[in-house]
Image (cartoon, helix red, strand yellow):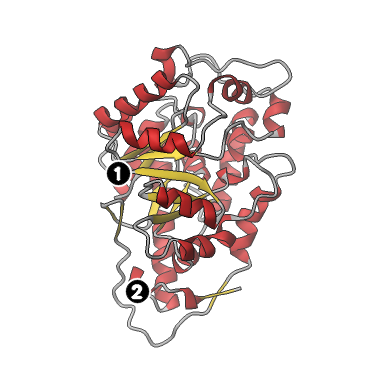
Amino acid sequence: MEAINLFELEAIAREKLPREAYDYYASGAEDEVTLRENRAAYERLSLAYRILVDVSRRDMTTTVLGQPIAMPLLVAPTAFQRLATPEGEIATARAAGAAGTVMILSTLSNTRVEEVVAAASGPVFFQLYVYRDREATEGLVRRAEMAGCKALVLTVDAPLIGRRERDVRNRFHLPPGLSVANLLPEGYGGLPMAAGDSGLAAYVSSLIDPSLSWKDVAWLRSITTLPLVIKGIVRADDALRAAEAGAAAVVVSNHGGRQLDTAPATIEVLPEIADALRGHPVEVLVDGGVRRGTDILKALALGARAVLVGRPILWGLAVGGEAGATSVLRLLRAELDLAMALAGAPTIAEITRDLVRR
C-alpha cells in the first residue's frame, strides 16, 4: 500500500470507490459538524509525556468482555462492506483475527453471520438492530448465538436514520447482487432505490423499531445468555441506566457523526461517562474519529478500555481487500506502540489520565 497513514489511505480509497459508495461510508448527518468534531476533539488534546521511564519493553495486551486481545482496538460494525471489496465482511473477519482482536459484525452486513464467524480466527461480536418484527429480531439473536458470536452489541441511537445528505443526493441503494444478507430469510434483505431519498433511510423507517426503550433491553437480556453491549451513549445518566439494566459494556458513540448532528464528540464526553461508571462492572469502549495511535492512547487515558475503528477498515478494504484491512490494524498497532514508548507508558496500566492536557 502506498499510504503511510490513514489520512492518505482514505484519499486513495476515495479514488478507487464509486462515488455513491465512498459518500455512503464517509458521510455524516446534515452539516457534518459532529463528523468533523469527532476528529478535531482529539487534536485539541495534548499529551504530557513522562521522561526517563524504561520503555524497552511494551505490552498492549488486554481483554474485552473476557476475550483476550492483542491490542486495545476492536473493529467497529460497519454495514455493506462488499461495496468496498467482493470479500466484504469475510476479509474483515480474517484481518481482525490476524491482528488478534475482535470484529463486530453489523446486522446490515452483505454476508451472513454464519459465514463470517466460520471464516474468523478471532472473536466476533454481533451488532443488533431491533426490527419491528420481534420474531425476526429474536431469530437474529439465536443465529448469532448458534454461529458462535461472543457478545451482542445493541445499537440504541438510530430509531430513524439521520439525514445524510450525500446519500439523499445520490439516492443511495445497494447494487444488484448485494443484500442485507442476515435478513434474507425473513424477506427483509432488499434495499431498493427510494424516490427522492436514501434507500437505507427508507429501509430503516419501515423496518427498524422506533419504539425501542429500556424495557426492550430487559427483553433482550431475557432471551440470550450473551453479554450485552449498549452502543450509542453520550450521557453519563444513560450510561448509569445501562449499568442498572445489566449491560456488560457500553460504547460511547454518536454513530460516527451520522445520526444527530451537533451531538458532542465522543472523546469529550468519555471522561464523565467513565467516571460515572467507576465502581460498576461495566466496561467502557469508545468510537468516532480515531485515526492515530496517539488517539488510542488519549482514549485509554480518559477511561476507555479499548477503542473501535470503522471507516479506516473500509478504506483498507477498498484499497487492498483483506491485506488492506490487515495493514490498517498493523499501522494503528505500530503507532500505539510508539506513542506508549514516547509517552513513558509501556503498559496499559500506565496510560493514566494525567498524560492528557486540554
Across and down, in percent, residue 165 comes to 72, 33
Residue that appears at 47% across and 47% down = 1
Mark 2: which secondary structure?
loop
Q: Quadrant of residue 109?
A: top left
Few, some or many residues within 10 Å of mark 1 (<14, 14–19, 20+): many
Task: Decide which of tag 2 and tag 1 comes sooner along the chain.
Answer: 1
Residue drawn at 29 percent across, 32 percent down: 117
Res. 322 visible in picture: no
Camera-side residue of 75 and 145: 145
Residue 303 rendering spot, x and y as whole percentages = 45, 65
- Provide the secondary structure element on which disc 1 rests: helix
Label at residue 97: 1
Residue 10's spot in the image, x, y percent? 57, 45
Residue at point 47% right, 16% down? 189
User: In the rendered image, which quarter is residue 25 located in?
Assistant: top right
Q: Is residue 317 above or below residue 357?
A: above
Give the vertical position of 52 relative to 207 (above or below).
below
User: Residue 10 shows which numbered tag?
Assistant: none
Q: Residue furthest bottom?
A: 52
Q: Is residue 150 left or right of residue 184?
A: left
In the rendered structure, the answer to whether residue 111 lies left or right of residue 292 reads: left
> What quarter of the picture does the C terminus occupy?
bottom right
Q: Where residue 225 sits: x, y (%)? A: 27, 37
Say which quarter of the image contains residue 221. Answer: top left
- Identified by mark 2, the residue type is Pro
- Residue 346, disc: 2
Residue plotted at (57% across, 51% down): 8
**285 or 308, nearer to the observer:** 285
> What amino acid is at disc 1?
Gly
Spatial CA distance of label 2 from label 1 is 24 Å
